[in-house]
Amino acid sequence: MNAVDRLNVLKTYKLYVGGKFPRSESGRVYEVTDSKGKWLANAPLSSRKDARDAVVAARKAFGGWSGATAYNRGQVLYRVAEMLEGRRDQFVREVADAEGLSKSKAAAVVDATIDRWVWYAGWTDKIAQVVGGGNPVAGPFFNLSSPEPTGVVAVLAPQESSFLGLVSVLAPVIATGNTAVVVASEKSPLPALSLAEVLATSDVPGGVVNVLSGRTAEIAAPLAAHQDVNAIDLAGADEALAKELEIAAADNLKRVLRPQPVDYAETPGIGRLTAFLETKTVWHPTGSLGASGSSY
Amino acid sequence: MGPLGDSIEENPGLYSRYARRYARLVTMPSSALTAAHPLKDVASSDSALRRFLHGLPGVDAVGLEGRAASLGTRSIKTTAKAYAIDLAISMVDLTTLEGADTPGKVRALGAKAVKPDPTDRTTPATAAVCVYPDMVAVAKEAVAGSGVKVASVATAFPAGRAALDVKLADVRDAVAAGADEIDMVIDRGAFLSGRYVKVYDEITAVKEACGTSARLKVIFETGELSTYDNIRRASWLGMLAGADFIKTSTGKVAVNATPANTLLMLEAVRDFRDQTGIQVGVKPAGGIRTSKDAIKFLVLVNETAGEDWLDNHWFRFGASSLLNDLLMQRQKLATGRYSGPDYVTVD
């Protein structure tokens, strides 16, 4: 049979919530086009109830993911990079369509994205040594500060950089043990929805990353006001929306990372890793000090 | 006139089916049907009771489950939802039945039953707290001065495998400690082996031990009765023996309250009142965890038994985690923000 005789097999893009691929609860979809306005696919148009379900899934996954060893999280994230590598051609095509890039430029973006996963995978078991440690105190105590994940983080993915930008904001959130509800780029959500398929086939437990597509403003509002979301990254919000969301987020004292101009191609530094960490300090008594200055 | 008195003439279509079945069972002259309800004598002997229970119409399992499922699809929103959530909160029997129950835990539960949401004083109190007999006194103290009742499980809960005098002692203990309601379990072994009179006699004995001060809830453990026909028979048996409430399950087995078996029991209490004039309450227990589930049950009540049962005197939820979900939904309706488990108690 030659290629002309084959039926077109079109891909149905779906949400990724709790390790499953549901359609939007609302049943709505919207048309996604490439940079020249040509139709690419229909993506689910999420409602606030999809956001609510995603938060429930993320909360459920938090205990297991934050409790996993940092070394184990690093291995899981590296596995994601391996899976991305296997699907490289698909992502090159999707990124080229989404961002209007040539094949070679899109390939460079995808390579940078995979490298970004590997980079953050390496940080999982090192960040505690950079931002935590033993503190010298005047008393018979070990005093230790250790970074802990904040909890469920809502991530508004960057609107323009649909793949490299997405991974640059998502990977640091989950690398430190948080779980994430990601709102994909409104105009070009397809790379994010395909990334979900990669996550589902790597070793990332269901619910650690949840991907929603649709109108950023519509989904972000209930997430910002949600009492069970601990932090929100506003990378994909414009100035007016960011202000509104920050006000809503103040209600339960969410950590808010404001949008800032970023060049996603550059090495990111650990700013996004520390943004969603909290420092826990414990005082551990060592007993009274003997004449030698030590209790041992 | 038939043995069922006037109700047949009033509803010939609906009850002629029952009437035909009961007619051969009851030989008493109709003039004797005065104060006692017309079904009083069906338990006069082992064979009469057996014939009555086995004469009940068989349950159409597919139809029952279909009906329960279709009633579960109603969309209850905004003001109706707010009403349903408040009603459901007021119907909760807040339950702790663990080996590890401490007086402190029971006191905390009592405080929660009286004021489920301390941040919002308009939240209604729950109906009751449900504890083991030895915790009744503690629970009674914890809810003193409020309208919240104390229910106690008794009769060798949850298995019910003990001698009758042990079960009765259990009940008397709980009543003496001040329990307003007694949740007894039936002897499923006796029921399943067809010794209906034994079950009947146990329920009447427990009812007597409850006296006038405590209402009696009879738990059938529907998950162990195997068939819908058995659940229907157990419901009628319990009501004939004088139950004030019929309750699905203990919450200690794999299958607990389901919409279908609760629907079946609601049909039974409706038919029982039509025939005898006696209203009996229903309490699904176990497995109801979300507001959505609870609202589905309320729809079942309204559509099956009717509005008379939409009150915590006649319908209860046996639950513990349900209350937190109801409170979170209530907070969502009040503030417009989704709430989270950080804003309700951990119990």
Image (cartoon, rainbow, N blue to C red):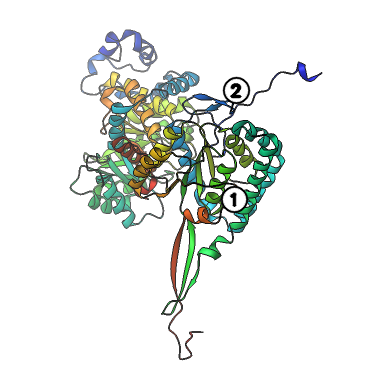
Q: Nearer the viewer, residue A252 or A20?
A: A252
Bin the neighbour count of mark 2 within 10 Å (Cα to Cα): few under 14, some 14-19, many 20 and up: few
Secondary element under disc 1, as helix, strand or loop, is loop
Amino acid type of the residue that numbered disc 1 sits on in the rendered structure: Glu
Q: Is A160 or A296 nearer to us in this picture?
A: A160
- The picture places residue B314, in percent across and down from the top left corner, at 28, 31
Q: Residue at x 24, y 18 (%)?
A: B33
Which residue is disc 1 drawn over? A266
Residue B272 in which image quadrant: top left
Image position, residue A218 (x, y; %): 42, 32
* x and y percentages locating residue A2 in the rendered image: 81, 19
Q: Nearer the viewer, residue B225 or A24?
A: A24
The furthest residue to the left: B145
The alpha-carbon separation of the residues under discs 1 and 2 comes to: 31 Å
Q: Dots 1 and 2: beta carbons under 8 Å?
A: no
Q: In this view, does B104 lie above or below B167?
A: below
Res. A7 in view? yes
Count of all numbered marks drawn on residues in the image: 2
Q: Which amino acid does label 2 sit on?
A: Lys
User: Is residue A204 toward the left or the right of residue A45 in the image?
Assistant: right
The answer to whether residue B184 shows anywhere in this view is no
Disc 2 designates what residue?
Answer: A38
| CA neighbours of label 1 inside 10 A, class few (<14), some (14 to 19), many (20+) | few
